[in-house]
Image: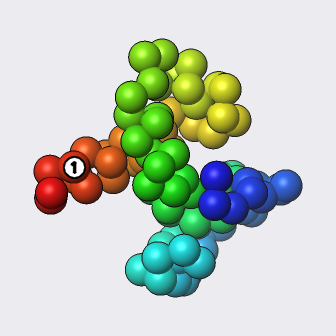
Amino acid sequence: MRMQLRAEPWPMGAHPPRPCPVCGEPWRPWALSRLPCHGKCLFTEEEQDKILADPRTQKEVAAALGVTVCTIRAAEGAAHRRKRAV
């Protein structure tokens, strides 16, 4: 992972958009999430490719990495888009 997950989740309430610390695009933290950036930005391109090639289910990969299934889906989606662009 590029960054560590937050020790404490983001508090409840509205969070204004801010730049993602990895890609710089607008990002809005979700309440109760521990992500420090976009889900797709949490993993390097090499890690995204490994996640995409992993034979386990998304749920099993997410549990092994300590993230949500949505974060795994975001990483896989980024890997798919990158492969289609080539």
Q: How many labels does the image show?
A: 1
The answer, for residue 81, to whether it is visible in the render is yes
67 relative to 9, above or below: above
Q: Residue at x 54, y 74 (%)?
A: 22
Q: Mark 1 points at which residue?
A: 83
Q: Which quadrant of the structure image shows residue 6?
A: bottom right
48 relative to 36, above or below: above
Q: Residue at x 43, y 17 (%)?
A: 55
Which quarter of the rendered picture does the C terminus lie within?
A: bottom left
Q: Residue at x 85, y 55 (%)?
A: 7
* Residue 67: x %, y % from top left: 63, 39
Residue 17 vs residue 3, the one in the foreground:
3
Question: What colour scheme governs how the chains and residues are painted in the rendered image of this protein?
Answer: rainbow
Q: Which amino acid does label 1 sit on?
A: Lys
* In the image: residue 76, left or right of residue 15: left
* Residue 54: x %, y % from top left: 45, 24
